[in-house]
Amino acid sequence: MKIDWTKVRVNPAECDTELGLYFVSGCGLRSTRPSVGSVSHPPEALDMVETGRTKAQEVDTRAVFYSFGTVRMANTFTGKGVLNQFFDLPS
């Protein structure tokens, strides 16, 4: 199958400015989970993506196949990042 790239639309990236709990998220084949966080400001989460990815790949060899980004969760979310123990964040 060939893709007609002239018909593919890409939305420009916009920084989320809503208040909430921001996490670095790791998306694998069967799951997506908060990897590092939470932080309260979107730029903080964006700055942590590369270090979160690096640490995930150190502790789980499958993480090289994951995609990483940021996610905002509702203020009622009580989970913690699964890699927080490796950072200065509550685990």
Image (spheres, rainbow, N blue to C red):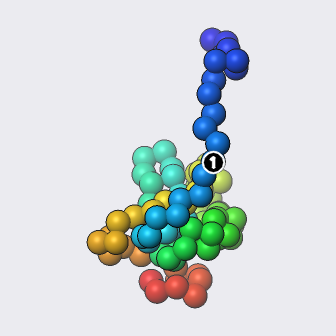
Task: State the residue at coordinates (67%, 14%).
Answer: 4
Q: Quadrant of residue 58?
A: bottom right
Q: Is residue 50 above or below residue 7?
A: below
Say what amino acid the circle numbered 1 marks.
Ala
Residue at the spot x=61%, y=73% of the render? 44
Residue in the image at 61% along x and 38% along y: 11
Quadrant of the image occupied by residue 79 = bottom left
Image coords of residue 14 (percent x, y): 60, 52
Tag count? 1
Q: Residues within 10 Å of mark 1 (few under 14, many from 20)?
A: few
Q: Residue furthest top?
A: 1
Q: Is residue 74 visible from the viewing direction of this image?
A: yes
Q: Point out the residue furthest to the left here.
A: 76
11 or 46: which is nearer to us? 11
Q: Residue 69 location in percent, x, y? A: 58, 57
Q: Is residue 83 visible?
A: no
User: Residue 75: x and y, percent?
Assistant: 34, 72
**Front-lying residue, 38 or 58:** 38
Residue to which mark 1 is pinned: 13
Q: Is residue 36 left or right of residue 31?
A: right
Name the spot of residue 21 as percent of width and height, x first.
44, 71
Q: Image quadrant for the N terminus? A: top right
For the residue labelled by badge 1, is the local secondary structure a helix, a strand or a loop? loop
Quarter of the image with the C terminus is bottom left
Q: Of 80 and 9, which appears nearest the observer?
A: 9
Picture residue at 42% right of the left edge, 75% below the top: 80
Quadrant of the image occupied by residue 47: bottom right
